[in-house]
Amino acid sequence: MKRGRTETRYPAGNAEETNDPARVPSNKKNQPPVADWVCGVCSNINSSQRDSCYRCTTSYKDSLRAAPSNEVCVRHVPSGLSAATVVACVERAVSSSGENLDVVRFTKLEDKVYIRYRSTEDAGRVLVLCQCVVEVEGKRYGMRFSSGLSTEQEEPHHVVPSIASGLPRELEHSSWTAPTTFRSEQEEKAYLKLLSSHWENLSQAQREYYEERVRRALSAAPAPAAPSAPAVSEAPKPATPAGGASATLSRLKERLAQKKAQTAVAQSVKAEAPPPPPPPLHKKRGRRKQWRRSDRVPWYMVCCCLPTWRRLISTASWC
């Protein structure tokens, strides 16, 4: 038998093809599996030796009762626990798996919390990711498809504020529409400021809308006018005071005297400085004398001196 993950499908047809609780005999609901069975939540094929689904941990009894819908029911929720807290824990578990499934509405009736999604596939995906269990404040609560849609109850649903909560009503992901016109420029600025203050919780469409509106506002803003140069016919000459020439001459003399003083100080410091040490003496290495052909003793000289060398050798041996 082939086990593993399979695509979640929700067939419709006769009693052999569906897990509709109205079509499953009551005596079969309490019996253990006799043969391989298909999970009614995630459509995974399980062995007859298993009493719970390998993929989503749904029990065999709950699998027979599962009726796929776009609404999920969290059971046995105490009265002191709000529906918003349960929904936030479910969304946190789903987002930790790397997925983002929008919640349309939710409500709490008696000890059950009903969470509606956009499609049946989304609701089934939530059950698979959470494995039909959600942990709230240290306790675990079972999840399954809602057997009857809660819209049939008298108590109305509450609109989900957002996945991360904290968004105002006009920015809810499920009901948000991009406004195209504003009554005034101040109203548009206030709306864009509202989007900017909730940037982390905005959807991708809302962020793109914000960037587009800001781009339009910047392009429509008039460019700042460059300061125009005044028309100058003739630059007025500054009035020179009577003693201006003499003051300038005195300043030049002062600067010249300062430069001479600085030069004299530099020269005195240079004279007082000790002389630099002499460079180290290095012994010059002579060039190696190369042997030349002309340095050899001629052969005739060797022949002339040969009797003399014999006489010296014989005398040395006699002594």
Image (cartoon, helix red, strand yellow):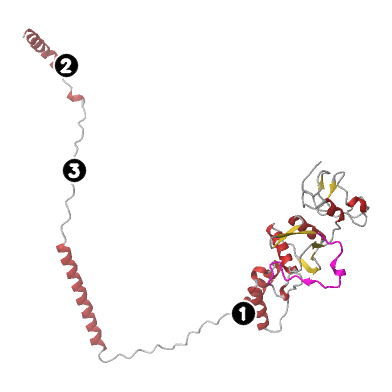
Q: What is the secondary structure assignment of the residue under circle 2?
A: helix
State the separation of the CA atoms marked 2 and 3.
44 Å
Q: Amino acid at mark 2?
A: Trp
Q: Amino acid at mark 1?
A: Ala
Q: How many marks?
A: 3
Q: Earlier in the sequence, mark 1 or mark 2?
A: 1
Q: Amino acid at mark 3?
A: His
Q: Earlier in the sequence, mark 2 or mark 3?
A: 3
Mark 1 packing: few (<14 Cα in 10 Å), some, or many (20+)? few
Q: What is the secondary structure assignment of the residue under circle 3?
A: loop
Task: Report x, y in % for residue 77.
Answer: 77, 64
Residue that carries the numbered disc 1 in the rendered image: 221
Mark 3 packing: few (<14 Cα in 10 Å), some, or many (20+)? few
Task: Report x, y in % for residue 288.
Answer: 21, 32
Foreground of the two, 78 or 274: 78
**Magenta segment main secondary structure:** loop
Q: Which residues are magenta?
A: 144-166
Residue that carries the numbered disc 3 in the rendered image: 282
Task: Report x, y in % for residue 125.
Answer: 77, 57
Residue 155 colored magenta?
yes
- In the rendered structure, the answer to whether residue 158 lies left or right of residue 184 reads right
Task: Report x, y in % for residue 43.
Answer: 82, 51
Q: Please determine whether, in this image, residue 32 is positioned above or below residue 143.
A: above
State the separation of the CA atoms marked 1 and 2.
113 Å
Q: What is the secondary structure assignment of the residue under circle 1?
A: loop
Residue that carries the numbered disc 2 in the rendered image: 299
Q: Residue at x 21, y 30 (%)?
A: 290
Closest to the camera, between mark 1 and mark 2, is 1
Q: Please determine whether, in this image, residue 131 is positioned above or below residue 219.
A: above
